[in-house]
Image (spheres, helix red, strand yellow):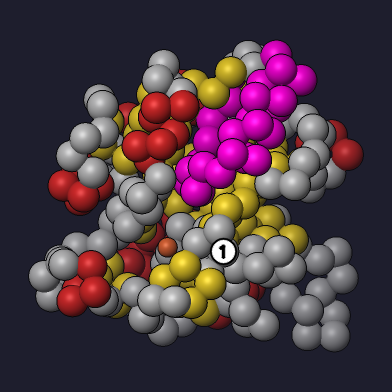
């Protein structure tokens, strides 16, 4: 299915009907950031939503249509970054039977009315989501602290939590906030800073070892929210791994 807010995400001809990108409006400090996420099919009859964006009427209608066409139902909602909690209540109401997984306790504090959220294990997040283990690798990006404490009501030095989500069959990496797309990918030094360079370096190595061929960012514009590996890396065109390596240089030891 391809609609206005849900679009098929294909990295090869074999990947049709397994992965979709979703989009929603998002603003921060009056800046239009755009919100993006993924929907993945797993277990033949189930859909997982990664990074639930603003649930508009149009998106809700397209979700109904996607469920009908795929004969799958939304059974997992996953917010992998601890600053992305604003839309979770709406999604939980829309899909009351779906399991809701969140990045950290911070989301519980920010959204105390959420029903039955499951906080991911901070060191081994994949172990918290057994139903996704076949389709996804999940890497905790450790060693970060918040970069904008006064804006969000956090304390200086508070740990910032993000788990990087990798869809194995399409080699698609989803990042919430720690790196952003641009002409060159860059580490989000505005929102995050490094608390423990050793831990961050180890996490970065684990992400690079996944060997992503596609990267989807939670923010951006329609033209920039995702990057695909180029077959031709001449003329200074860089692969996804090269772009990530470049972004991680600011802290990697
Ligand atoms: Fe964000």
Which one is nearer the viewer's eye here, 251 or 55? Answer: 55
Number of residues whose C-alpha sits closer than 10 Å to that of mark 1, classed few (under 14), some (14–19) or many (20 or more)? some
Against 61, residue 176 (above or below) is: below
Q: Which residue is mark 1?
A: 34
Image position of 132 (left or right of 111)? right
Question: Could you say where residue 24 lies in the image, as x and y percent from the top left?
Answer: 57, 53
Question: Could you say where residue 5 lies in the image, as x and y percent from the top left?
Answer: 69, 46
Image position of 3 (left or right of 176)? right
Ligand 1 shown in quarter: bottom left
Residue 128, quarter of the rendered image: top left
Image position of 10 (left or right of 143)? right
Q: At numbered mark 1, what does the secondary structure look like: helix, strand or loop?
A: loop
Image position of 38 (left or right of 75)? right
Question: Could you say where residue 81 lies in the image, as x and y percent from the top left?
Answer: 37, 53
Residue 14, quarter of the rendered image: top right
Look at the image and tell me in which quarter the N terminus lies: top right
Is residue 83 found inside the magenta-colored segment of the image? no
Residue at 54% x, 30% y: name it.
48
Residue 197 shows up from this direction: no
Residue 17 shows up from this direction: yes
Residue at 46% x, 81% y: name it.
249
Furthest-left residue in view?
A: 155
Which one is nearer the viewer's eye here, 213 or 222? Answer: 222
Residue at 85% x, 80% y: name it.
234
Which one is nearer the viewer's eye here, 238 or 159? Answer: 159
Residue at 31% x, 53% y: name it.
82
Question: Could you say where residue 151 lies in the image, as x and y percent from the top left?
Answer: 24, 74
Read off the magenta span: 46-71
Against 245, residue 226 (above or below) is: above
Look at the image and tell me in which quarter the C terminus lies: bottom left
């Amino acid at each position: 299915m391809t609609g206005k807010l849900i679009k098929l995400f294909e990295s090869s001809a074999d990947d049709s009907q397994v992965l979709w990108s979703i989009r929603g409006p998002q603003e921060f400090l009056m800046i239009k950031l755009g919100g993006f996420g993924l929907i993945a099919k797993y277990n033949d009859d189930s859909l997982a939503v990664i990074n639930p964006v603003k649930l508009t009427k149009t998106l809700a209608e397209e979700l109904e249509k996607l469920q009908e066409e795929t004969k799958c139902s939304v059974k997992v909602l996953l917010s992998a970054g601890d600053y992305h909690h604003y839309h979770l209540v709406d999604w939980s109401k829309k899909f009351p039977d779906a399991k809701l997984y969140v990045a950290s306790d911070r989301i519980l504090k920010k959204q105390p009315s959420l029903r039955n959220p499951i906080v991911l294990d901070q060191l081994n997040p994949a172990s918290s989501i057994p139903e996704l283990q076949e389709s996804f690798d999940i890497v905790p990006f450790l060693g970060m602290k918040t970069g904008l404490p006064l804006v969000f009501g956090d304390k200086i030095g508070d740990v910032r939590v993000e788990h990087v989500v990798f869809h194995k069959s399409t080699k698609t990496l989803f990042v919430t906030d720690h790196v952003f797309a641009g002409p060159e990918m860059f580490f989000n030094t505005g929102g995050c800073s490094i608390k423990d360079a050793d831990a961050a370096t180890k996490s970065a190595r684990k992400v690079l070892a996944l060997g992503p061929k596609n990267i989807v960012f939670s923010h951006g514009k329609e033209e920039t929210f995702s990057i695909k590996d180029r077959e031709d890396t001449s003329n200074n065109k860089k692969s996804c791994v090269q772009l990530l390596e470049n972004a991680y240089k600011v802290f990697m030891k």
